[in-house]
Image (cartoon, rainbow, N blue to C red):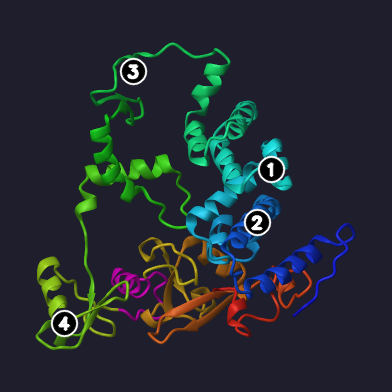
Amino acid sequence: MQSVTVELEAASTMELVNALSTIATELAQREAPESAAACLELTETLVAASDMQESALAGFIGRIDATGEQARWGFPSTQAWLRSRLGMRDNRAKERLTLARQRHRLPEVRAQLASGDLSYGYAVTVADSVSRLNDTDCAEAETTLLGFVDQGFSPGKVAAFGRRIRDLIAERDNTEDAPDEDSRRGYDKSWLTTTRSLDGGRYVKGWLNPEDAAIWDGTLAPLAKLAGPDDPRDLPERTAAALSSVLSGGHKASKVTVICNLETLTGGNAPARLTDGNPIPAAQARRIALAAGVSPLLLGRGNTPLYLGYRERFASAAQRQVLETLYPSCAVRGCEVPGTLCEVDHVHGWALGRSPTDIDQLALTCGWHNRFKHTSPNQIQITKDRDGRYVYRLLPPADARGSATGTGPPGSVGPPGDNPALDWAA
């Protein structure tokens, strides 16, 4: 059992974090008390302490986000770093990033969270509600929403109020606008108006009743998701792209790729697999081939040229098809950008004359990591997995490797691979 002695006022932030980590390690290894009542009390105390830690965490994340430090470590965004390096689910990463970005505009929320007078759930709810407000309305919204907290409303109710925050501010200040023509149409029937612009574009405005809104959500929402952590489009842009895809029929152009040998398609028993790696029986592979059609996919020399040597700079369409089959996502461990949105990367650098445009010398990487690999080659470790695919692992910056005193993130002792738990690509 380790002992921890810390002079709180004299200790540095790093010393406090290390002490907290030691205590957490010891606490995690202990069995829960037999008394359920004691467990209830301990849980409430521990959660309150965890919420106060979230205040410090928001400050750390905010500083990282403001300075772009995560890019130096090979991550295209702070959210990608939280998700890939720290193993957070996407919603939790978004919550923490929103709180980190809004805390400087919410002085009362920040103070109450740090003192333990406001839970993390309420703090995140308020931060999310004001994220699209200007500074003046943000201050008004903070006061209004904290008033609802004081009245005992649940975080879910406060979130619902937050979605209507502009109307609430206007109502309190007696600045409500008279209903416009669109509002006077009512809400029973859907309507849509379009106006042609001088440059050939078109403005679109309208309203969907609940029934039509459900159809809209069911059709467009799956197509409007983020393409990956470095997708630069906001939700309105992704929604427009999804609508264009539906109008053009592109959402129906589905394609199934089955990876198998010729014997399987002609009656053999060897199993096949889909592009996501899931194995399928030979009989099912043949049924898919008959229903969806199969494009020739030649993983070697043959009728389709996959080995282009040094004379060709860019990969061919056939090579791209093979790579998209081999790489369902970016070759960088932890990066979730789909392979279909990635760029073809010469593993050892075509410009340096070390990597010909041959299928076994190519991989798929997202645009951000392709540029990062070019500018920071010493921070990419390249290996091959047992299936022959290249795997890129991110390494810490040179000035942070081997640090045990705070130069790098906690636990960065020695190079990746010495301890799987400290692998920077995990």
Residue 155 picture location, percent across and down: 52, 41
The image quadrant that residue 212 belongs to is top left
Q: Nearer the viewer, residue 53 or 406?
A: 53
The residue type indicated by label 2 comes to Ser
Q: Earlier in the sequence, mark 3 or mark 4?
A: 3
Tell me the CA gap for discs 3 and 4.
Answer: 58 Å
Instruction: State left or right for residue 60 relative to residue 389.
Output: right
Tell me the CA gap for discs 1 and 4.
Answer: 61 Å
Q: Earlier in the sequence, mark 1 or mark 4?
A: 1
- The magenta span reads 306-327
Residue 12 picture location, percent across and down: 84, 61
Could you say which disc has been placed on residue 117 in the image? 1
The residue type indicated by label 3 comes to Asp
Could you say which disc has been placed on residue 282 in the image? 4
Identify residue for label 3. Answer: 182
Task: Identify the element where label 4 is drawn.
Answer: helix
Instruction: State left or right for residue 66 relative to residue 178.
Output: right
